[in-house]
Image (tube, rainbow, N blue to C red):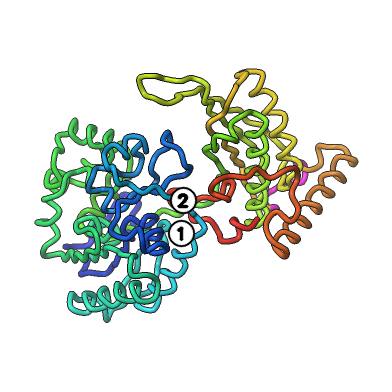
Amino acid sequence: MPQAEHDNNATYKVGGIKWLFLDLNSYFASVEQQENPALRGKPVAVVPMETNSTCAIAASYEAKAYGVKTGTKIADAKRMCPGLRCVLARHNKYVDYHHRIIDEVINHVPINKVWSVDELSSRLPERLRNVEAVTNVARRLKDGIHKNVGEAINCSIGVAPNGFLAKVATDMQKPDGLVILTPENMAERLFKLELMDLPGINVRMNERLRRGGIKTVEDLWNVSPKHARKVWGSVSGERFWYNLHGYEVPDLETKTSVIGHSRMLDPNLRPPEAARQVARRLTTKAATRLRRKEFYATRFYVSVRTADRYDPARGYSTGRRWGAEARLSPAQDNFTFLKALDDLWQAMLYDLRPERLLKVSVTLTGLCKREEITPDLFDTQSDAYNKLLQKNETLSQVIDTLNAKYGAETVQLGPSPQTQAGFVGTKIAFSRIPDKEEFYE
């Protein structure tokens, strides 16, 4: 393939196989099977709490064979798979294994980007850019994970001219697959896929493509980059076209814009006062992360979902949703956000009059570094207020230091709610891997 230029005058290049993508198979469930050999070979669902009204956040391949998957309601999953073993999620374990896997991978190939807790990519060095060499290193990598991390931990590896196609290749053979897409074979193999097999094409985008006359991967392959841009309605379509054809398209830079935590509440934590204690804990954890990353926040958002409307047809509570935001002077101390939480919580109680809450979330936005804060933003308050603000920041940092030295919850502002999972607010989310420190803050 030739080089190609897009509208921003940057040149995309394509060549031979350059990228390796690793995708851990049924990662959460595999870690649980590794930790407990009695679960190996058995259908396993990882759950956020021990109740039939929750959903699976992961499923082993044995469970997937019965149709159980991420998002399946546990009551339904148990009917689909009578022998299903439900295991409470342990996000600290998944993060721990993640770092052990990273340590093993770098013994074999460089890591260019960690995409999520179970996905990473590597731009291959020149010596590995041929089928024989990359096949050998992929097999050694798999063996290394089995030997040094855990025999129940499997991965699928894809190799291709760019990272996008390498990721696509990992889904072509699961579990424990190895697929190599070369410039010579990739069109033939890609044309066998459905459009929604490609990352970034969901139901709505698939419908938009169909309206644009694109019904198959081959159709998409054969349109022009400009036509792809028109269908997408942005330059993203053109970037997608180049990725599909194997060109190396630079990733768009992103930056942290939100810090937050949410929690589906255990049944005993659903009364409003108990839920408020969870929200307070989520708030202090978010503020601790904010300080560790050296950010200030200017907006604090709280949202809840109630559990007080039972739908007989669905067999579970649907609930109402509520959310509100407080705008603040740039802050990073616990006390400012806890005061905002108390004010918003009272407004929520007045608006909803809830009997029980199902979920609480707190979010810090409007993030900025100290050097980005103009002096007048801090100087609009009285001297007394600014002294209090400085005192609160200092006290919050002292709490961080004591908890880091002597263990989580050595010093806490108010009672700490006890959850089944053990960690309030700290969990793995899409594309976000908690720092190890978060489990002990």
For image coordinates 18% across by 46% down, the residue present is: 224
Q: Main secondary structure of the magenta part?
A: helix
- Residue 414: where, in percent of width, then height? 75, 43
Nearer to me, 413 or 419:
419
> Which of the marked residues, 2 or 1, is nearer the chain's N terminus?
2
SS at circle 1: helix
Determine which quarter of the picture holds residue 24. bottom left
Q: Amino acid at mark 2?
A: Ala
* Residue under numbered circle 2: 89
For image coordinates 26% across by 35% down, the residue present is: 203
Asked if disc 2 and disc 1 are in contact, CB closer than 8 Å, the reply is: yes
Q: Residue furthest right?
A: 384
Q: Amino acid at mark 1?
A: Tyr
* Residue under numbered circle 1: 94
Q: Quadrant of the N terminus?
A: bottom left
Drawn side of residue 430 relative to residue 326, left or right: left
For image coordinates 31% across by 74% down, the residue present is: 141
Residue 11 visible at all: no
SS at circle 2: loop
Nearer to me, 289 or 6:
289
Q: Nearer the viewer, mark 2 or mark 1?
A: 2
Determine which quarter of the picture holds residue 133. bottom left
- Residue 336: where, in percent of width, then height? 75, 40
Q: Quadrant of the C terminus?
A: bottom right
Question: Is 372 contained in the magenta span?
Answer: yes
Drawn side of residue 280 relative to residue 57, left or right: right
Magenta stretch? 370-377
- Is 249 placed above or below 373 here? below
